[in-house]
Image (cartoon, rainbow, N blue to C red):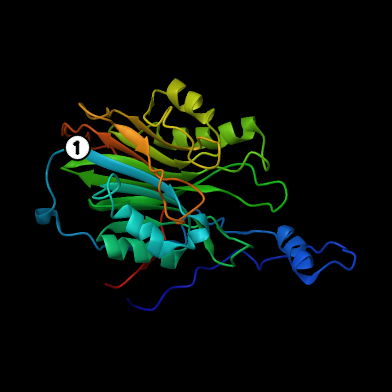
Amino acid sequence: MGEQAVPQVNGGVAVRRRTVARWAGALALTATLGCAQASNLMDPAGPRFAADYAPGPDSVRTAGPIRVVSFNIRFAREISRATELLRRPPLAGADLIALQEMDDQGVDRIARSLHLDYVYYPATIHPTTGKPFGPAILSRWPIERSWKVMLPHPSRTRGQRRTATAAVLRIGGVAVLAYAVHLETPVQITPSEREDQARAILRDAASFPGPVVIAGDFNGEEIGLTMRRAGYRWLTEGVGPTVSFFNWDHIFVRRLAPARPGPAAGVVRRIDGASDHHPVWAILGWTPVPTPVGLPTAPGVVSVRMNR
């Protein structure tokens, strides 16, 4: 791998400190970190990290079911365990993977290990880790273009902004628009504000004429109703809890249908400490239909490519 690029941040990380009585050192440290402010990466053009590790088009099948996976890997900490999990059924051989809570090095390690192309736009420099934090798209198919979608409503305590990563993939000759999503948590914004975040993604996808896949951690199950009203299939509805007791990780599609026969979607229960979230998966039927030419125009991007 070539030299890792360091993204530019909009200002330094500001830290507010609370007055704390003489508690133990560990408790004082926890309180300080809890007040740390996020350093948001508000440039819609970047920073952008990307690399091409997938085999060339001649080595990729031209038809067949499409396997989609979404996985929130907590602060990108357990990359080796997560990679091993992604090698095992029912996640193995995924055509499209949406990852959340990633940093640039973690994304590159997973993509390189699984021989996938990727694009990654971090949303912030997270105060807990001091590293880039955001969603990434990994693909077995060529990534033709990509961009960052800015989402409204910063978090209450840290002022943290969320983004989605969008990419147009060329799957079997058909242009498919994919989004990796991580909406804000319920304690940081209201349900209506989180719905606003989902609607920002829906508006971004509205003009795309071909198939659309939106996958990620939505931090709420009710968002599925918003997506359904917008014409999307809710493939992971009813698969069961994906984090603690909650069903927050989902896959939605438009102009695509679940594969038949057999189970078309599910959640992986055994994760061997890879994260606090359980990955979800879906298998889509695939009938290649040429996509009209008028694809959405992405904003200009600042690209950082990783050498093989």
Asked which secondary structure carries label 1, the reply is loop
Q: Residue at x 51, y 32 (%)?
A: 199
Q: Residue at x 25, y 47 (%)?
A: 95
Q: Which residue is mark 1?
A: 65
Q: Note whether 304 is above or below 246 in the view shown.
A: below
Q: Is residue 49 visible?
A: no
**Residue 211 occupies quadrant:** top left
Q: Which residue lies most toward the top here?
A: 229
82 vs 162, nearest the viewer: 82
User: Mark 1 is on which residue type?
Assistant: Pro
Mark 1 nearby-residue class (10 Å; few <14, some 14–19, many ≥20): some
Query: In screen coordinates, is 150 left or right of 177?
Result: right
Q: Residue at x 59, y 61 (%)?
A: 126
Q: Is residue 190 visible?
A: yes
**Residue 253 occupies quadrant:** top left
Query: In screen coordinates, is 84 left or right of 216?
Result: left
Q: Note whether 106 is above or below 145 in the view shown.
A: below
Q: Note whether 61 is above or below 41 in the view shown.
A: above
Q: Residue 6, percent across and down? A: 49, 72
Query: In screen coordinates, is 293 left or right of 222?
Result: left
Q: Which residue lies most toward the right here?
A: 21
155 vs 84, nearest the viewer: 84
136 vs 148, nearest the viewer: 136
Query: In screen coordinates, is 267 left or right of 57?
Result: right
